[in-house]
Image (tube, rainbow, N blue to C red):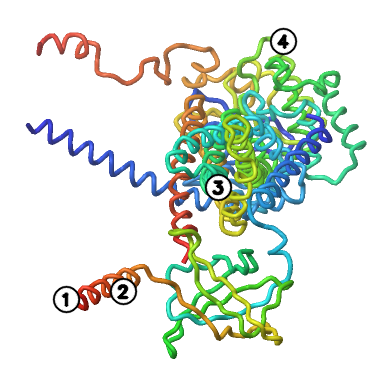
Amino acid sequence: MKIPRGKVVAIMGGSGCGKTTLLRCIGGQLRPTGGRVRLEQHQVCEMSHNDLYRLRRKMGVLFQFGALFTDMSVFDNVAFPLREHTALSEEMIRDLVLMKLEAVGLRGANKLMPGELSGGMARRVALARAVALDPMLVMYDEPFAGLDPIALGVIGQLIRKLNDALGATSIMVTHDVQESLLIVDYIYFVSNGKIVAEGTPEQIRASDDPFVHQFVHAEVEGPVHFDYPAPTARQEFLGEHAHG
Amino acid sequence: MNRTVLDLWVGFFVALGLAAVMFLALKVGNLSSAHLSETYTLQAKFDNIGGLKVRGPVKSAGVVVGRIVDIKFDPVSYEAVVSMDIDGRYRFPKDTFASIYTAGLLGEQFVGFEVGGEEKMLKPGDVISKTQSAVVLEKLISQFLFSKAAEGQDSK
Amino acid sequence: MSMRMGNVAGFLRKLGHAAVERVWRLGFAARFLLAILAYSGTAFRRLHLTIREVYFSGVLSLLIIMVSGLFVGMVLGLQGYETLQRFGSTEALGVMVALSLTRELGPVVAGLLFASRAGSSVTAEIGLMKVTEQLKAMDMMAVNPIARVVAPRFWGGVVSMPLLAALFSAMGVLGGWLVGVVFIGVDDGAFWSQMQAGVDFRFDIVNGIIKSFVFGIAVSLIAVFEGYDSVPTAEGVSRAITRTVVTSALTILALDFVLTSFMFRGTS
C-alpha cells in the first residue's frame, strides 16, 4: 500500500477485515508479524521506544468516538499536546488552542467538559486535538461512525480542508462509502487481510469488480457472504430428526 | 477542581496525618524526655539474669533512670553481661549495687541500683562490680524442699 | 464412571491453569512495578499531578478512616474493659487499646478500608480510561501513560496510606479513652500512664508505620495494575475493581503475618 504525501487516502472494508489493525501498525502501536511499515525514511516496526515517541509528535490520531480525556475541559484537551511537547507560554497556548477550536467551529465551547458534548461535537474537539501540533500525518479511525447526516458532512469537509491547509497526509479508515467518495483522493479496499481493490473515486464508482460493486452499492449478497458458515439447512433442521 | 483549593486540602491532610503521628509518639508512646537527653553506658555482670529482657527498665529508688540495651554471654567467665543506657543527668558511685528484681510477684524483671557511700563516681563504660543475680523460682522451691527435708531428718 | 473421572480431570486442569495464571500475573505485576519506578520522574517533576492524587486517595478517605478508627477504638474499649475486669486489671485498658491499634489494627484495618475506597476508585478510573481509549490516545500523542496516569496514582496511594493509618490509630485511642474513661469510669491517669509505659515508640509505633507503608505500596500497586490490565469492557472493569479489593485484602493479611513474625518475635 502506497500513500503519497499531501493526499487523503481511505482504507475501506467490512467489519473485522483488519483496517483498524493496519492503522495501529502504521502508528507503531502494534508490531506486524509480516511485512513492513515505512514512514518517510523511518522503519516504524523496528524503532526504539524513544524514537517512536519522537516520530509520533508529527502524527495526529482521531480515535473512534474521540477518546477525549474526560477529567479535563475541552480547552485542556486540545492544549494537552501543546503543554506536553512544547515549552510555549500559557498565552501562546491559549491563542493556539482557540484557533484550532475555531477551525472546527467550537471556539465557544472551550470551557465545556467532554461529558457535556454531543457525539459530533466530541469528534470535532478530538479532531482539533489531533491537529494541535500541525502534524504531517493525520490518521482517522472510523471518523463517521455514529454521526447524524449533518455532522457527517461537517466532519468530512473538515478532514479535507484541514489536510489541504496543513499540507499534511491523511489516512482514513472507514466504511462510509458515500461520504468518503466525496472527499478522498484514493481508496484501498481490504478484505480478510488482503488488498482486493484500489483506485480513485471515479475508478471505484465505475468499477465492475464484484467486491467493490457489492460494497459501493450496498448489496446483500456478493463476495462477502450474508450467512455465517454453518452446516446446510437440510442437515440442521432435518438431520437431527432423522437420528432422533 | 481549582488547583489552589486542592493543594490546601492536601496540605491540611498531610498536617493532620503528621499530627496524628506526633500524638502517637508523645502521648501514647514513651518518646519522652529521657530518650531525648544524653545517656551513658554502664555494664554489669550477673551469674543469672533470670527473665531480664532488653528494653527493661533500670531503676533507682523506684524511679526509672535508664534502659537495658544489650544482654550478652561472656564465654570466658561464663557470666551474663548486661549493658545499660543511663540518663546523663544521674551519676552513681563506684560501690553501687546492681540487683535484679521482679516488679510485683510475677511481673517483669528490672535492674535496681542501690547506692553506697563512695565519693568516686562511675564513669561511662565502667563495669559495676557488685551485683546480685535474679532469684530463680525453681531454686527457691528446691531450697525450701531441701530445708524441709533436712528439718524432718533432724527431728527424727 | 468415566464421565466423573473426566470431570475430575477437567477440574484439576482448570485448577492448574488458574494457578499458573496467578503466578504469571504476579510476574507481570512485578515488572509493572519496575516500570512505574522507572517512569516516576514525571510524577515528581510535576508534583501537582501527584498532589492531585493524594487528594483523591487520601483526603477523600479521611472521613471513613477517622470515623472507623473512632468506632474500632470504642469497641476495643468496651470489649477490653469487659475482659480485663475479670482479672481486676482495668487500668491496663489504655495499654491494651493502644498496642492493639498501633501494632495491628491501625495498619491492617486502615489498609483494608483504603483498598475498598481509594483502591477501587483508582482501578475504576484507569480501567474506564482504557475502555474509552484515552490511554491509547495518550500513547499516540507520545505521552507515556504510565508516567502521566499510573505513577502519580501509585505514589499518591503510597503517601496517603501511612498518614491514614496513623490517623486511624490516633482516633482509635481517643475512642478507647472516650468509652473507658468518660463513659465507664476507668481512671484517667492510669489509662494514659500505663499506656505511655507500655507502648514503645521504636518498637510499636514505628513498626506500625513501617507496616502501613508496606501495605500502601502493595495496595497502590494492585489498584493501578488491575486498572491498567483490565479487559476494556464494562464487565472487564467491574471485575478488575472486585479483584483489586479482594487481592488487596488477602495481600494485606498475608503481609501482616510475615511482617509481624519478623517484628514482634519476642523481645529477647
Name which of mark 1 and mark 2 comes first in the sequence.
2
Mark 3 → mark 4, Cα distance in angstroms: 74 Å
Whether residue A99 is situated above or below residue A31 in the rendered picture:
above
| Residue at 60% in and 59% down | C202
Q: Residues within 10 Å of mark 2 (few under 14, many from 20)?
A: few
User: Cβ–Cβ below 8 Å for labels 3 and 2?
Assistant: no
Mark 3 vs mark 2, CA separation in Å: 37 Å
**In this figure, which residue is indicated by the disc labeled 3?**
C95
Q: Nearer the viewer, mark 1 or mark 4?
A: 1
Report helix, strand or loop for mark 1: loop
Q: Given the current orientation, which residue lies at the most extreme left position?
A: C1
Q: Residue A239, position in %: x, y? A: 15, 13
Which mark is in front, 2 or 4? Answer: 2
Q: Quadrant of the C terminus of chain A?
A: top left
Q: Are marks 3 and 1 in contact (CB under 8 Å)?
A: no
Type of amino acid at the residue the image marks with label 2: Gln
Same chain check for tags 1 and 2 = yes
Farthest-out residue, right: A91
Amino acid type for the residue under numbered disc 3: Val
Determine which residue is flagged by label 4. Answer: A150
Please give the chain letter of the residue carrying mark 2: B
User: SS class of the residue under badge 4?
Assistant: helix
Residue underneath mark 1: B156
Disc 3 with disc 1 on a shared chain: no
Q: Secondary structure at mark 3?
A: helix
Quickly name the residue at label 2. Answer: B143
Q: Secondary structure at mark 2?
A: helix
**Residue at image location 68% in from the left, 48% down from the top:** B27
Q: Are marks 1 and 4 on the same chain?
A: no
Residue C72, position in %: x, y? 54, 34
